[in-house]
Amino acid sequence: MQIANCKIVKCRVTVPLLISVFALLSGCGSGGGSDSSVTITPPIVNNNSKGGCFTTITPVGGSNTAISGKIEYQDKEYGLTGFTNNTTNYYKAVRYAEVEIVNSATSSTIASAFTNSSGLYRIPAATYTNVTSAYLRVGSYTTGNTNSKPPVEIYDLSGNLYAVGCDSTFTPQAGTSVTTNLSIPTSNEAAGAFNLMDVFTSSGEFINSLAGANPPLLNAYWEVGNSYGTWYCSGAGDPLCPRGEGIYVLNEVNGDTDEYDDDVLWHEYGHFVAAKFSKDDSQGGIHYLDDYTLDLRLAWSEGWGDFFPAAVKTWLNSTNTALLSTAAGVSASQYVDTNNGSGWSFDIGNSIGAPYIYSSNEVAVANILWRTMNETTSKMSGIWDVFYSYIRTAASPINLETFWDGWLEKQPDSLETIFSNRSIFFKQDLCEVDDSVAAAKGIGACGGDEHYLYKTGASDVDFVSFSANAGTNYTIETYNLKNGADTYLTLYDSSMNKLSENDNANGVIYVSGFNYDYYDSFGNYIYPLNNGTLSSKLPLFTPSISGTYYIKVNTSPNIPKSAGRYGTYTLKITNQ
Amino acid sequence: MFVLAVPISLNAAWRISGKTSGKPKPPVQISISPVNTSIAPADIKPGDAVELKVAASSRIEAQKMEIKIDITGGAELVSGETEWSGPVAKNGEKILVITVRAPLKGQGQVKATAVIPVSGGTSFAATASYSLGEEKKKDKPKPPAKKDSKGRDIIEYKVR
């Protein structure tokens, strides 16, 4: 045993000789005094206040050992263009995690407890026989915690949970109180796992505030060098999800990493929430923020994911701002993704105009949800009510139309203005009512030829009348389809004899698994884009008799799952 | 016209059962690659000069796209511009060509970032990196797995 350069202090401690020698030597480095009331302070292993293990042992009498302390981890603050330089003392509590006291000799756990919301833990006083060396360890999981907090487990890609242990040890002496604090710096290989755990715990608490119950267990997988990507996997069997369902987090060496990108993590958690509390029909895949031709199911799912970080941060702003990692001035509606020293951001609250329009664009969906949360009387609880109570049991496909229908049924405020600002018109157009020949309006009679396919609780049908001259060629078509519209055209004479009909101008009838609704060899999901692909065009019409003819427009009976029941179209009749 | 429903891809089953929902992508992309496409990173020896193409593309029209190239780790710029700023058309692309010399020791890095600032708290950016020179030593191996109090496998990392 090496004796440090220290001053001998006398302590009246009724312990065996070996222990009293230890207690004597523990006075090295600091402390003083001459009787048993003196606190014995052994050398602190790490003199920094952050980033390390810090143990103090205090004699308290009795025959037990009490162990307590605080666990924290170093986080990274982010602004709109990436991480800020505010990291030195940027530590947060490791909440609801299991702390173990491990016997150094046998590697067995001799005691355990869970940290609380401040990262504090306390192991009840106990007697530890035959334990001469022990250390503190904390795990990257909250399962089993005694505070009934959301269950979260963070694994590496091999299926191992992360843990961080103190390199220094202590002897759990009888009659002492041991305080061991652990502070995990970002330089530690496991540090990222603790930010994942904290971020997912926050969002789990947010869901608990809405649902009245914790979400089910979330498994997340992260590892230095995981260059696959960040995504939520809904099930097993996908090579991109080697450990089955859960959230996988990117970490490219010298590249993009996401373990400290809280908005990215919450985006994926939003998908987890949709899978567990609602219904999500998205087929997944790559999605660009500027794309307004997306599968409506994908746009809804990703729009929900884009909105979810803003919802969590809004909640944290009112309940516990200390859990946020955003720099001053960054609003809750701003989504940030850092990348190798830089970063990008977009604001779902203020991204206006094209291309952030239509129910086929995820930013438009996110903006609608953001404004609904902020501008309606029922706010987030109203959104949750529709998300959980309506969408969960609604008929597929689930998209923004489903949210609209559910809100109309369950909530008092109108969303018409919020939707219209995104060029989404789920309402009757100026030609309504035009559901029959008798009610048909002439072409262009309603202030334009743009129509909305929309009817509450039923399928909308639009009849348009026009006068045709014998021997003249007429082209009749729909175009400028928006918001997932899929039209079907039928031409009638004045006696309602069907003269012609057309589903898609491109001649394709979309059949699931045949010419859409499958994945190609590159893993891309194939579907007809919502960019006018589903427009209709009747065969060239040359009437033999001049007179009034009628065009019926309705949603196609062969509508692909990627399109919508509603939508906007323009009818055009040209004569040659 | 009626078409029979015949599955065209038998690999759909695994994909549909394990759907992935990834993070959103900004409308700007950037890549770094050798002009001579037959060159692989492993072919570049210490001290070699290699011509690199930095290609930034934008899915949206923008009044300003900024490209910045940083060269670190001992790699040296031999020729070419490392900054550019200008308008970009929808689906447009801007290419910069630079010649970089790999360091004699260690691994150099070429990092390129393209940024499109947009009003209202939005700025899109993309970053790409290219390594040249001696391959970096692999990180130390993981500690061996242990068991926690519930018998689960854990990897324990130490803090001093």
Image: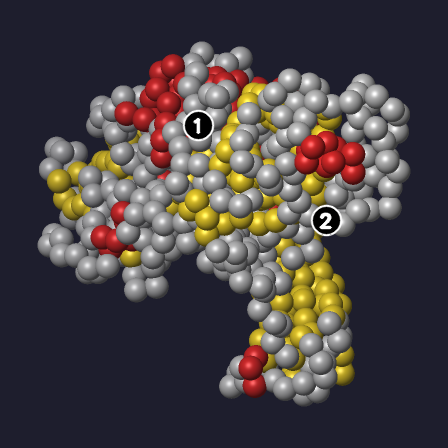
Crowding near pointer 1: few (<14 within 10 Å), some, many (20+)?
some
Whole-percent x and y of residue A401?
37, 30
Horizontal placement of A216 versus A227: left or right?
left
Seen at 40% across and 36% down, the residue is B150
Query: Depth check: A550 or A8 in front?
Result: A8
Q: Chain of mark 1?
A: A
Tag 2's secondary structure? Answer: loop
Whole-percent x and y of residue A317?
65, 24
Residue A377 shows up from this direction: yes
Whole-percent x and y of residue A414?
47, 17
Q: Chain of mark 2?
A: A
As drawn, the label of residue A144 is 1
Seen at 28% across and 51% down, the residue is A237
Q: How is the image coloured?
A: secondary structure
Q: Is residue B137 above or below residue B48?
A: above
What amino acid is labelled 1 in the image?
Gly
Give the quadrant of residue B111. Answer: bottom right
- Image quadrant occupied by the C terminus of chain A: bottom left
Q: Which residue is mark 2?
A: A1
Query: Depth check: A231 or A171 in front?
Result: A171
Total label count?
A: 2
Seen at 16% across and 38% down, the residue is A493
